[in-house]
Amino acid sequence: MAVLTFNYRLDYRKVWAGWASKSQLDRRVRHLNIFEHYAGEDLADSSTVTPFAGAADIDLELVRAGVWERRRDGVVRERFVTRPDGSLAHSDKFRDGVRRVHSNYDRQWRLRVETAYAADGDTISNRAYRTARGRLFLDVGYEKGRPARHRVHGSDGITTDFPTEFAFRAAWIQYLHREAVRPVFVSEDRRLDGLVVQNPHSSDITSVCAIHSTHLAAPYQDVHALATYNDSALRRAEKFDAVVVLTDRQRADIEEHYGELPNMTVVPHPVSAPWRYRLPRRRRNIAVVTRLVPVKRVQDTIDAFGTIAAAYPGVNLEVWGSGEDLERLKTHAASAGLAERVEFKGYTAKPLDVYSRALFSVSSSLTEGMGLSTCESLSVGTPVASYDYRYGARDLIQDGVNGYLAEDGDVEGLGQAMARLLSSPAKLRRMSRASRAILRSHSRRNYRRAWENLLDGIGQE
């Protein structure tokens, strides 16, 4: 199995290590990158650092921390910018006060990417990519600022032209398809779907479309009001060998609009908490862990808490996360008289620890793909009070067993769900034990088995 990436990064070795650890990937899973394929070698940056020697150049002026400029007659001709470790990150060359060339370097001060700009200084005209040894392996011509002609320079001196970015990518998919035994390509990015269902080089690619988000347009209630992103895949669902969604409710909504899709299946996300997760003594608090953005409707959770706060003076609401709504939410909590009862705790890298210390958690999103925060909360034995939004809430929460559902958008109803969880400590303990059943229903073993069965099935057809 391999994970394919289509963008250019020098730090993919480090990024991949993080992905593999977080997702508990099998060691046999590989990472393949399109730029490394055409370069014919690993493009990863070295861990060694060559400091930029700008301070030794008497023609360069340090204008601010990490930024040097070369001027002539008061006009900037070149600019050099360093990383925090002192290595050169990039440089710019100017002509008549306009940037014309932007160069990116690795940590050893080796030129890797050089971008040329049109006379306006903003529109890209060409971009050239080099290996660590300096060999040009790809140059890309741009049209109206968008990548167009891709010219690959092989190490054997042979050049190959691709008229479009799609052709450049499609040729790589065709190569992987030709070299593998019974390959199945899983597309998780709608921008890449065409590479497997409209590939001009291979008409028999076995493909799976994986959908991880809603297919509906805001406010996510009308099953016939569709968002462009996933609608583009669902309209041509028959071109895929399989379409995978996360919840039964989304599958039902999709088939209500598009009609029956025999090749569609449901494979929920797995939970990550271990069976032997340490369950600490819980504090008397309610937890929210989410991005603080409008689609999460954290204000509704604050307002719902406000309807019960007076009845439960020893309970506070903890809001964990960061985002554009932070200051507005703080102001709203204060204006509602809850400044002392709603605590904004900031970002956490350990959401399971936050959930495990709470009495229960709350989710009031406008929409989700499945609701990973709900999964995480239940996996450590923390029940959930939630709106019945699309998608995931009713697939994960059994009303009165491991949490309570309120009608979507009903703030008072959400407050009542919170009150019901607080009203009986004994019942809350029973619901806490019941919550951990998700470790069986959404285990990594079940997740792997579901995907293996799916892939083996379509791979045999």
Image: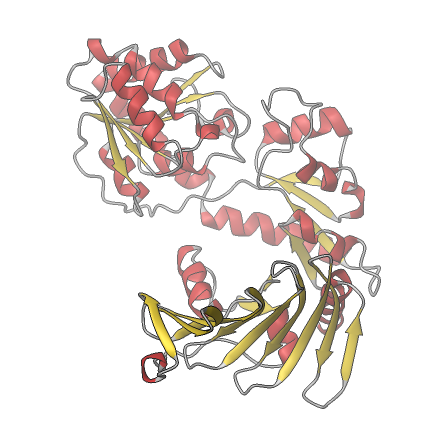
Q: Residue at x 76, y 82 (%)?
A: 159
Furthest residue toward bottom = 156
Let me know if residue 226 appears in the view.
yes
Total count of labels: 0
Residue 125, placed above or below residue 429: below
Q: Tell me where residue 78 appears, x and y as whole percent.
A: 48, 73
Residue at (43% x, 33% y) in the render = 293
Res. 57 image quadrant: bottom left
The C terminus lies in quadrant: bottom right
Q: Quadrant of the N terminus?
A: bottom right
Q: Residue at x 50, y 24 (%)?
A: 394
Query: Closest to the observer: 397 or 96?
Result: 96
> How are the residues colored?
secondary structure
Q: Residue at x 77, y 59 (%)?
A: 205
Q: In the orientation shown, which residue stands out farthest toward the front?
A: 73
Quarter of the image holding residue 146?
A: bottom right
Indicate the position of residue 273 as horizontal and vertical percent values. Answer: 35, 45
Most foreground residue, 406 or 119:
119
Give the image location of residue 332, x and y in percent. Answer: 32, 20
Residue 425: x and y in percent read 21, 19
| Image vertical order of residue 305 relative to residue 435, above or below | above
Report whether 156 appears left or right of 448.
Answer: right
Q: Is residue 361 visible?
A: no
Of residues 405 and 439, the one nearer the viewer is 405
- Of residues 157 and 391, the one nearer the viewer is 157
- Judge left or right: residue 356 versus residue 241: left
Image height of 81 relative to 273, above or below = below
In the image, residue 444 above or below residue 265: below
